Amino acid sequence: MKKILVPTDFSSNANKALDFAVQIAKQAKAEIFLVHACDFIDTTFKDHLTIKKEHNNLLLDSANERLALLKDSIEGAEKVAVTTKIYNGSVADSILLASEENGADFIVIGTRGETELTERVFGSTTSGILGKTKVPLMVVSPLSEWDITEIPSAETLPGESGKFAPDAILFATNHFEENKELLNPIVDVAKLFSSTIHVAVFVDTDFAEAYDYVYNIGELHNYIKFLEKTYPDVLFKGEFLEGEDFESTIEKYNEKNGIDIIAMISYPKTFWDRLLNKRVTKEMAFHSKIPVMAVTAK
């Protein structure tokens, strides 16, 4: 992980997402690529051209100034390299274009802004790019809190803070994926922080039959063996979860076990959709109190 893309609308939630990205970048020794999308007025037609140009220049100057402040603050306080760029167009298109153009390895985004307009735009933007990015995406909702432990490092001097270390990642799956291209991003984050990966299989008690319990328990046991063999330097823990609602079951487990990140693999049409009649990854991303990491399966 060398470059982390972070879109910002300069709202408090965007800044929260940026904080998460900075902590990951510090541990990974990665660069932050901070982007902002401006909705410039079209100057193709000459009507009120001067006014249009003045409006666009004001937007550009303001965005450049705010990006520069964020860049200076992060580089000065956190010692993380930051590159900034402004795009013209929709937020979603700008994020996808920026990721492609600049070879992003990871995207960290907030779900909404602090005003009604930015809440609508940023919320719909996040929903729009989930499942479309070619790189892993971490979504930070307004309720997200990273219950982390600071641990000293070899570079930490006496009296200084240690590095942030999320202890546990919950990987929720019913597919038992063995594709390393899908698994590696989740494992890579775990390796960065020496986190335990809790592999959770959920069964809906309203729909499940005896076969579902037998099948999933057996598959989970075999899956943990596969993961341990494939990634011997990562600690895995298998969990069989059952309940009437996926989100509330996961939330209870997270609170009890101190989960810091939820990881999910997003599919175009999945078992999750048929089971719960909704896009689980999107629902979790918007309602979770902790960040949700989505890896898209093509």
Image (cartoon, helix red, strand yellow):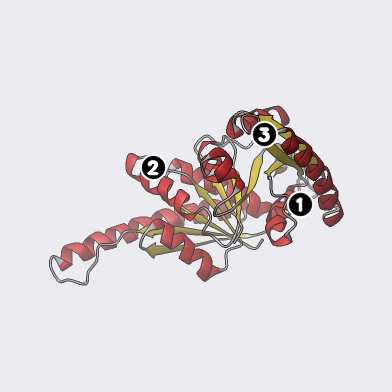
Report, in whole angstroms, how far the alpha carbon at label 1 lies from the one at label 2. 34 Å
- Rendered image quadrant of residue 245: top right
Q: List the residue tagged with mark 3.
A: 208
Q: List the residue tagged with mark 1.
A: 191
Q: Residue at x 57, y 62 (%)?
A: 134
In the image, 19: left or right of 54?
Answer: right
Graded by Cα atoms within 10 Å as few (under 14), some (14 to 19) or many (20 or more), the crowding at tag 3 reads: few
Graded by Cα atoms within 10 Å as few (under 14), some (14 to 19) or many (20 or more), the crowding at tag 2 reads: some
Report, in whole angstroms, how far the alpha carbon at label 1 lies from the one at label 3. 35 Å
The mark lying in front, picked from 3 and 2, is 3
User: Residue 168's spot in the image, x, y percent?
Assistant: 73, 40
Task: Mark 3 or mark 2: name the one nearer the start of the chain.
Answer: 2
Report, in whole angstroms, how far the alpha carbon at label 3 lies from the one at label 2. 37 Å
- Kind of residue indicated by mark 2: Glu
- Kind of residue indicated by mark 1: Lys
Q: Residue at x 54, y 46 (%)?
A: 139
| SS class, disc 2 | helix
